[in-house]
Image (cartoon, rainbow, N blue to C red):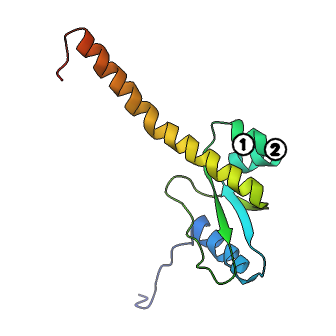
Amino acid sequence: MCKNLHLMKQPSKTIKLSQTLKKFTLLEETTYIIYGSQEALALYGQSLEALLESDCYDFDVREYAKGKKTPNLVDDAFEPDGYLVIDENSFRKLHKNLCQKIKKFILDPRRERWLEHLELLENGEGEV
C-alpha cells in the first residue's frame, strides 16, 4: 500500500487560464482581455456587435496592468474555454453590456413578481 500517495486534482480551466494571464501584469502596457465560453468567444470572433446584441452572458472582461494585483477570474457562472486580447474601447463596451445583461437577468424576475402582486391587489386577492 502506498502511504505517501497524494491524489492531485487536475487544475481547473480557470486556474490554468489565471496562470497564463498572469504574464500580462509584467508588460509595460495595459492589456485588456475577454474570456468566456466557446459560444461567447465565437460570437466575439464574428464581431463585437454580435456578442453585444446576443443574449449570451457567459463571458467577462479583465484589465491587466503592470504593478497592479492580478485580477481574479469568475468561474462560478461559467467555465472559461479561452481568452482573447482586446482593445480598451471593446473592453469598456463589453463591460457595460455585461452589466446591463446581468441587471436585466436579476431585475426582470423581480419586476414580473411585482406586476403579478399589483394585479392581485387590483383583483382584491392580495395583501398590501
Residue 46 visible in image = yes
Which labelled disc corresponds to residue 47? Answer: 2
Residue 10's quadrant in the figure? bottom right
Q: Position of residue 70 (x, y in %)?
A: 60, 76
Task: Note whether 10 is above or below 40 in the view shown.
Answer: below
Residue extending farthest top:
123
Tag 2: amino acid: Ser
Query: Residue 22 or 108: which is nearer the viewer?
Result: 108
Task: Note whether 69 is above or below 105 in the view shown.
Answer: below
Which residue is the site of mark 1?
A: 51
Residue extending farthest left:
127
Q: Position of residue 22 (x, y in %)?
A: 67, 78
| Label 1 neighbour load within 10 Å: few <14, some 14-19, many 20+ | many
**Which residue is rendered at x = 34% and y = 26% of the image?**
114
**Which residue is rendered at x = 29% and y = 21% of the image?**
117
**Which residue is rendered at x = 72% and y = 80% of the image?**
23
Query: Residue 6 or 93: which is nearer the viewer?
Result: 93
Which labelled disc corresponds to residue 13? Answer: none
Q: Position of residue 123 (x, y in %)?
A: 24, 8
Q: Position of residue 97 (x, y in %)?
A: 63, 45
Q: Are marks 1 and 2 in contact (CB under 8 Å)?
A: yes
> Relative to 21, is 101 on the left or the right?
left
Residue 88's quadrant in the figure? bottom right
Task: Note whether 20 is above or below 118 in the view shown.
Answer: below
Residue extending farthest right:
46
Residue 37 visible in image = no
State which quarter of the image contains the N terminus.
bottom left
Residue 52's quadrant in the figure? top right
